Image: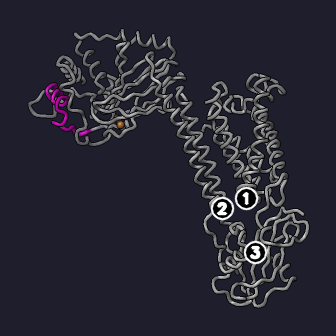
Amino acid sequence: MSTNYRLRAAYLYFARPTPILPDQWSRQVLSSLYPQLNLDAVRIVGRMVGALPTPAQVDSNMAAEGYDEAVFRWNRRDVTDSTGQPITLVEVYEAPLPVAVPLDASDMRTPPFTRRDLMAGALAGVGGGLAMGLLAMLVGLFDRSGAMSVWAPLNQIASAILGPDVVGPQFNFTTALVGSLFHFGLSALLGMAFALIYHGVLRLPRRLGAPVAAGAIYGLIIFFLADLLLPMLAPGMAFAAKPGFIAGHMVFGLVIGIVYSRLRPNFSGLLVVLASLLFLGAGVVVTSLNLFMPVQASEQAVGVDSLFNLMMGIATVIFLLVQAALVYAALQFRRKPGDDEDGPPIHGNNTLEIIWTTVPAIIVIIISFLSYQTFVAERAFAKTDMVVEVTGQQFFWTFYYPEEDITVQNELVVPIGRPVQYRLRATDVLHAFWVPDFRIKRDAMPDRVTDTRATASKIGEYAIVCAELCGAGHAQMRGTIKVVSAADFEAWVQEQKNKTVDANDPIAYGRSVFQKAGCTTCHTLTDAGGAGQIGPDLNQIGVVAATRVAGQTAAEYIRTSIVKPGEYLAPQCPMGACPANVMLPTFGTSLSEAELTALVTYLSSQK
Ligand code: CUA
């Protein structure tokens, strides 16, 4: 006789009042009747009725409760509680049940794990493997960029069948064979393991959550094995830590869940389809679209982005799961009209608590491991690196190339493919050197040198942004970084070196001082290419300065305004009335007397 059955619900009918609430009393009655039974897995319902139900009434009650005779069996028993009160107990079992089973307490435990469960798991694993092969071929057809190279082994099979022109990478028989064996073999094993854990050990109900749990467990196991363990054991077999990998295996796990559930009765097919679509959607979004990040213009950007995408992928999956559970619970368990019963008494759930503690812990450990790798990769400083000394100052950047002895303002030029160390400092307050397209950002501080490193990988012009609120001109403290070829960089270095200024021409010299000291960032002065909007407009300053303070010449007024910026406040700035002085008071000492004189002469000539 089969023992493959399971008590799912117990209904207790009382014809007289119970000492406590019917549901709780029912629970006590049941646990005294069947001390070995795990009541947490049983739905217990107590009902106060006028008279105990007849067998025909029990059948119609069970039908009204939604128990289908094709799937469930119920058994009516007459018992008494500890006060001697007669009770009708209706036990509802999950099929398959060959016949009404004679009951005794030892039979009523959860059924043992059967060979059939193991077979179902193995078959499901192989089915999942086949489905993944098909999916890989499909992905190979559409993904020419190689962004989903996690599918590589199966992609290569597709390539062999459809031709290398249709599918990305070249066919390599050994890799394809190893990859396939790896996938099919491991998936069969994991399918069995899943069946064993899910059904045999955790004893979770088959109906709900199977595909979700299968997907999550399977995805995490595979991810851990292939992405973390394999690279450590055999560096040549390293897979990239890509979100497609984990998402793909979650889909794979779902397929296992689906096939498994098809082989077992009582499974909600719609739920499986919905959950699969959720996972598939999440995987596709995080893998194929780079929705969240700007251009990847440095080699370091790739690692940062895959880390971000991975976290985004995991967060998306969790978000969808939580929202789906929320919506499902709100719809499924809302109060039915006329139902004034207590909810079932639930006293915690160890299985759930273990799951929701270990799964996040594993995720966090994996993420910290990968974060550390990314961090170390970004900071792999080498003696051969090119060095650029970056100085942040209200409100502009100065870049000094020690090897070439070149200083430029706000416009950095770097050669493609060469690692560059940025050594950061600030002269006044905190600034932050941020190149979004390079994915680097680090604070620049007075009295301390910080550093960061990037290897430009894409020719173009990218923004440098100050990412630390540093004063009134913070928003305008922006520069550009130009990535050029090695030859263009050499040409640019020569051009900079040839830019000598005749110190005997006070106008040209003064203009170069104006530019080098960063004045253009805050002031508009067309002749020097300045378009800053923070300080007063200096076009025609030579005329205006002479009118400001009685008895002072333009040159005297200008010199005082540079050396003691707070002394006079101009009435008009480009963005309205000039605010309280924001100019640095240090130009009197940071500029040499010759530079200061040339600067004053130059500005006085602006009419
Ligand atoms: Cu410098 Cu904000």
Residue 94, can we see it?
yes
Q: Residue at x 35, y 16 (%)?
A: 402
Name the residue type under label 1.
Arg
The picture places residue 359, in percent across and down from the top left corner, at 61, 49
Q: Do the residues bearing badges 1 and 2 touch, measured as CB atoms within 8 Å? A: no
SS of the residue under disc 3 = strand
Give the percent coordinates (x, y) of residue 161: 84, 27
Task: Look at the numbered disc 2 and say if its residue's Cβ is closer than 8 Å to ligand 1.
Answer: no
Whether ligand 1 has any atom under 8 Å from the Cβ at mark 1 is answered as no
User: Magenta span covers which residues?
Assistant: 554-572
Q: Earlier in the sequence, mark 2 or mark 3?
A: 3
Q: Secondary structure at mark 1?
A: loop
**Residue found at x 16% / y 26%:** 559
For ligand 1, give the image quadrant. top left
The residues bearing labels 1 and 2 have C-alpha atoms spaced at a distance of 25 Å
| Dot 1 crowding, Cα within 10 Å, few <14, some 14–19, many 20+ | some
Numbered disc in front, either 2 or 3? 3
Q: Check disc 1 and report the residue beneath it.
A: 203
Q: Which residue is denoted by mark 3 in the rendering?
A: 10
Q: Residue at x 56, y 39 (%)?
A: 308
The way the protein has been coloured in the rendering is one colour
Which residue carries the number 2 mark? 327
Left or right, 341 with respect to 564, comes to right
- The amino acid on which the numbered mark 3 sits, given as a three-letter code, is Ala
Q: Amino acid at mark 2?
A: Val
Q: Is residue 567 magenta?
A: yes
> Along the polypeptide, which appears first: circle 1 or circle 3?
3
Residue 491 lies in what quarter of the image?
top left
**Whole-percent x, y for residue 33 in the image:** 73, 76
Which numbered marker is on residue 344? none
Q: Position of residue 104 (x, y in %)?
A: 81, 72
